[in-house]
Amino acid sequence: MSNLFGKFKSEINKGVGVVSAKSKGLIEITKINSQINGLQAQKKSAFEDLGSALYNMHSENNMDMEKIHSMCKELSLIVASIEEKKEQIKKIQEEEQEAISKLKPQACECGEVIKEDAMFCSKCGKKIEAEE
Ligand SMILES: [Zn+2]
């Protein structure tokens, strides 16, 4: 029990780690978001290309299904990449939450859950402090 709490106390010391975990995740998410923006632009122009190709084919009364097929395939690849990037962001956020929850002490010796940034246990009043 005392070993366990000793571990918790030393982990409080890593409070600064929460900030760095958050900013590290944010940098990564910002990067992926800009990639998503690029892909959204690609998707938009691919849709426009497909639309105008369809219109031209229709006007000329010559539907080239193979061309439509390959354009749609290209489009679905872009859509899939966007979904993939969104999943990456979700994963980073989950990993970030996990990292933060590991950094934070979960409970006091008395069993009370320690609130974020608490200096003292709200139940038994034990001081929550980091060990050097
Ligand atoms: Zn307590």
Image (cartoon, helix red, strand yellow):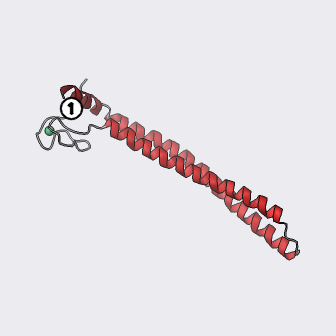
Among the 4 quarters of the image, the one containing residue 17: top left
Kindly identify the residue that appears in the image at 10 percent across and 40 percent down. 124
Apparent side of residue 85 relative to residue 115 in the rendered image (left or right): right
Apparent side of residue 87 relative to residue 53 in the rendered image (left or right): left
Apparent side of residue 53 relative to residue 22 in the rendered image (left or right): right
Mark 1 lies within 8 Å of ligand 1 (Cβ measured) = no
Q: Which quadrant contains ligand 1?
A: top left
Mark 1 crowdedness (10 Å alpha carbons): few <14, some 14-19, many ≥20:
some
Kindly identify the residue that appears in the image at 57 percent across and 49 percent down. 85
Looking at the image, residue 18 lies above or below residue 130: below
Q: Residue furthest top?
A: 132
Instruction: Point out the image quarter for the C terminus.
Output: top left
Kindly identify the residue that appears in the image at 88 percent across and 75 percent down. 61
Looking at the image, residue 128 lies above or below residue 48: above
Q: Position of residue 116 (x, y in %)?
A: 26, 43
The secondary element bearing badge 1 is classed as loop
Number of marks: 1
Q: Position of residue 13 (x, y in %)?
A: 29, 30
Kindly identify the residue that appears in the image at 41 percent across and 37 percent down. 20
Residue hosting label 1: 129
- Specify the amino acid type for callout 1: Glu
Instruction: Point out the image quarter for the N terminus.
Output: top left
Front residue of this view, candidates 51 and 30: 51
Apparent side of residue 116 relative to residue 67 in the rendered image (left or right): left
Q: Position of residue 69 (x, y in %)?
A: 77, 61
Q: Position of residue 47 (x, y in %)?
A: 71, 64
